[in-house]
Image (cartoon, rainbow, N blue to C red):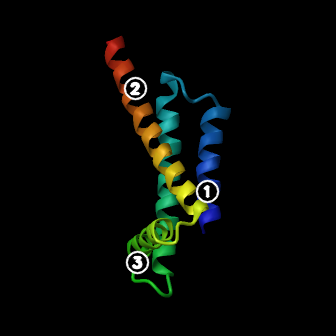
Amino acid sequence: SMSLLSFLIAVTHRAVLEFNWTKTRCKNKRMALLCFMLALISYLISYMNQHLYSWKNLLHMTLYMVQMTARQCLEDRDPFVTMAILAATMAGYYGIKAVIDEQNNKLKED
């Protein structure tokens, strides 16, 4: 399921870049693709959520995974888990920073 989710996200990115839909004039095409892919991904997550055998839902499983990862990082001091958490934190930071910078650039242009 996760590999299919990754594949759908990769196909979305590839389509936006391949057809050069990053320009403003292609906003409707880009939004149509993104909404369609959001529908597919939402359905896939719903399917995964309905077919979890040992968990009530995907949120409970995700919370457990976060707790287990934190325990491995803090108590067991597993270096690769620590590196993964640091890399994910940095990715989140730079992603948020990119969005803020883009918004600031739009405000400066106006």
SS state under label 1: helix
Q: Which residue is mark 1?
A: 6
Question: Mark 1: which amino acid?
Answer: Ser
Q: Which residue is mark 2?
A: 101
- Residue 72 position, x and y percent, is 50, 70
From the viewer's perspective, is 107 left or right of 57?
A: left
Q: Say which residue appears at 52% left-offset and 72% top-offset.
A: 76
Q: Which mark is residue 56?
A: none
From the viewer's perspective, is 14 left or right of 70?
A: right
Q: Are discs 2 and 3 less than 8 Å apart at CB?
A: no
Q: Which mark is residue 57?
A: 3
- Vertical order, 79 against 64 (above or below): above
- Residue 106 position, x and y percent, is 36, 19
Q: Say which residue appears at 49% left-offset and 65% top-offset.
A: 73
For disc 1, the neighbor class at 10 Å (few under 14, some 14 to 19, many from 20) is few
Q: CA distance from mark 2 to mark 3?
A: 36 Å
Decide which of 44, 52 is in the foreground and name it.
Answer: 52
Decide which of 67, 40 is in the foreground and name it.
Answer: 67
For marks 2 and 3 on the same chain, the one whose residue lies earlier in the sequence: 3
Q: Say which residue appears at 53% left-offset and 66% top-offset.
A: 77
SS state under label 3: loop
